[in-house]
Structure formats: C-alpha cells, structure tokens
Image (spheres, grey):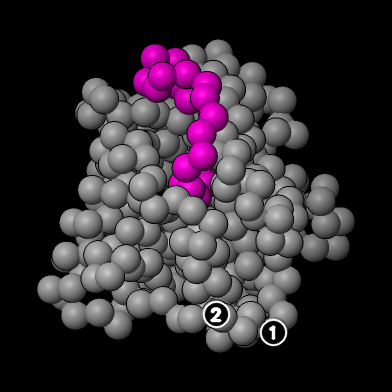
Amino acid sequence: MSTVRAMGEDDLDAVRRVEASTFGAWWKGLHGDAEALPVRTRTNVLACREKDPEGCFAAEEEGRVVGFIFSRTWGGVGWFGTFSVLPERQGQGIGKRLIAASLDYLRQDSSRAIGLETMPESPYNLGLYLKLGFQVRMLTLALGKGLGQPAGDEAALPRWSQADPQTQERWLAELREASGRTHPGLDYSKEISVTTRYGQGDALVLLQGARAIGMATLWLSGSREGSGDGPGTVQAGFLHPTHTDADSFRRLLQGCEALARAHGKQQLIVPVNARHTWAVEQLLHWGYRVQRAMVRMVLKGTDAGPRIDACVDLGRWAG
C-alpha cells in the first residue's frame, strides 16, 4: 500500500526518474524507439516545487517513490501538473490519492478556479479527469514563430532581474492589480520571482509611463537535460484589460522576441488559451503558427463556465 506524503527536496531525483519513465512510451511514439525521453533538469523540478511546496506530494512504497504530483497556484487560479505514476503501478488508486491531496491543497482558497491541462490524444487521462468532476473548456494553443532579423521599431523592455528591489515591489503591486482585472485574484508574482531566482530566464515588464501594465516571463533554458538549444518559451504573460490593444501586445511580444534572440534562440513559443480569441487572432496575424494543443479542464463549480473574451492572458496550466 502506498503512502502519500509531502514532497521533499530529497525526493527530486526520484521524481525526475518517475516522470521520465511515465512519459517515456508517449515520447517514443512521437520520436521513435531510438530516442529516449531526457529527464527533467534538477533545477526545473526544484523550481516547480518551490512555487507551492505545501501542495507537492509523493507516493511512496517501501521507501521508493512510485508517483508524484505538483500543485500550482497563481492566486485565484490553481491547477495540478506535472502528475505521474510509474507504469507498473498504475491502475491501483495511487493517482487518485495524489489528485485528492492536491485538490485538498488547492481548495484552501474557496474562491479559486481549479483546473488542469492534459494531452488531447490521451483518452485515459480525459476519462479519468471527467470522472473526477472536471469539465472540458477549450484548447490551450502553443504558437511558435521563427526569429529572424529584428523589426526596425523593436525596443527592449525593462527586465525584472535588472531592477532594484524597491522597483520590483512596486511593479508587483501594480501587476497584481492589473492581473486581478483579468481574473479575480490572479497573481503571477511567484512565477516572476522563481523564474529569475533559478536562472530559468527573466521577466519583462511593459510600462505606461512609469506604471507596469503588463508582463511576460520568458524561459530561456530547457526543462530537460540537453535541451538548452531549444526555443524560448513564454511561460506566463498578460496585459491590463484597459491597455489591451494591438500596439501594447506587439511591444510585449517584440520584447520577448528580442530577449530570446539575444540568447541565441531560433524560435519563440507563446501559449494562449483559445477562449482569448482576440489574442489568438493577433498572434496568427503576426506570423505565429500552432505547434501543439493541450485540453484545458476546470473542476465543476469553480469557475463561471465556458466563455470567450478579448483579453491577453498567456500561459499554460501545466508544469
């Protein structure tokens, strides 16, 4: 019988092995038998745990980690992922106990919208989450664009890592107020601070005068061993609703493209849920193309139901 307990730093290497084993078959189906799935970097797993350490759990049997789950919160939004159970231990209720532990943590804020994202080609995952009370919303699209020469009007945006602590605190307060208008209680503070603390990348801040009206966290290092030459990836980003216009969105994207290009990246990946219809249309107009899609699901009763809007709120609900 497995025991579900809090995940500690001593578990991180075991978590990396379980994750690679769990997703290895799926990876080989995409890339062929000759290519094994690289393990996640220790920095990536450590950073995922630090964002919500009290919501990360391991399933243990006789001193061996056989499964794990990460919980993530952005204030008024929460989800679980990455979530894995060793293939030979699946179908024995371990996954359901891990999910239950995560949901208990996420429900500590009764007003929080709770969700997840999963692979649309996995009927088992979709069926499991439907049985647990999650409802399908819309696809989150990962849109990519090759980075050629910079545009003539491209200007660098202020970087979080280069600001003094007083400026960072002011930006955080302004960004929390702005993101809360996109979704009540939405807060990207942890995403910004942890991304820079662990050297995964940096955060760019869009200013109107001296006031922060938007931001984007850009990952510049790969999440898996040997993936350092991969694309730059926007992990999260948004614009204040009253400043959501083509010029502001374009400046935010150009700042991300410039930083990615400066770090030798050949491509930029931007995730956006299909409910944000205007943002999707703008990205397509600017030459971005769909690279991959994930299904977003939300626990029944924790949001207002399916809707579409013209907000810019970039990000994946996945680890």
Secondary element type, mark 1: loop
Mark 2, residue position: 154
Q: Residue at x 33, y 58 (%)?
A: 213
**Which residues make up the magenta segment?**
297-319
Task: Confirm whether residue 37 shows in the render.
Answer: no
Asked if residue 47 lies left or right of residue 125, the reply is left
Number of labels in the image equals 2
Location of residue 179 in the rendering, given as x and y in whole percent from the top left corner: 32, 47
Residue 153 lies, in percent from the top left, at: 56, 81
Q: In which quadrant of the rendered view does residue 98 lie?
A: top left
Q: Is residue 256 left or right of residue 33?
A: left
Disc number placed over residue 149 in the picture, else none: 1
Instruction: Indicate the position of residue 160 as horizontal and vertical percent values.
Output: 32, 74
Number of other residues with Cα within 10 Å of mark 1, as a class: few under 14, some 14 to 19, many 20 or more: few
- Magenta stretch holds residue 56: no
**Image: 32 above or below 157:** above
How packed mark 2 is, by other alpha carbons closer than 10 Å (few <14, some 14-19, many 20 or more), is some
Asked if residue 308 is among those painted magenta in the image, a careful observer would answer: yes
Res 36 quadrant in image: bottom right
Magenta stretch prevailing secondary structure: loop
Which numbered disc, 1 or 2, marks the residue that appears first in the sequence? 1
Quarter that holds the N terminus? top left
Q: Residue at x 44, y 71 (%)?
A: 200
Can you say whether 251 is above or below 19 in the image?
A: below
Q: Is residue 264 left or right of residue 317?
A: right
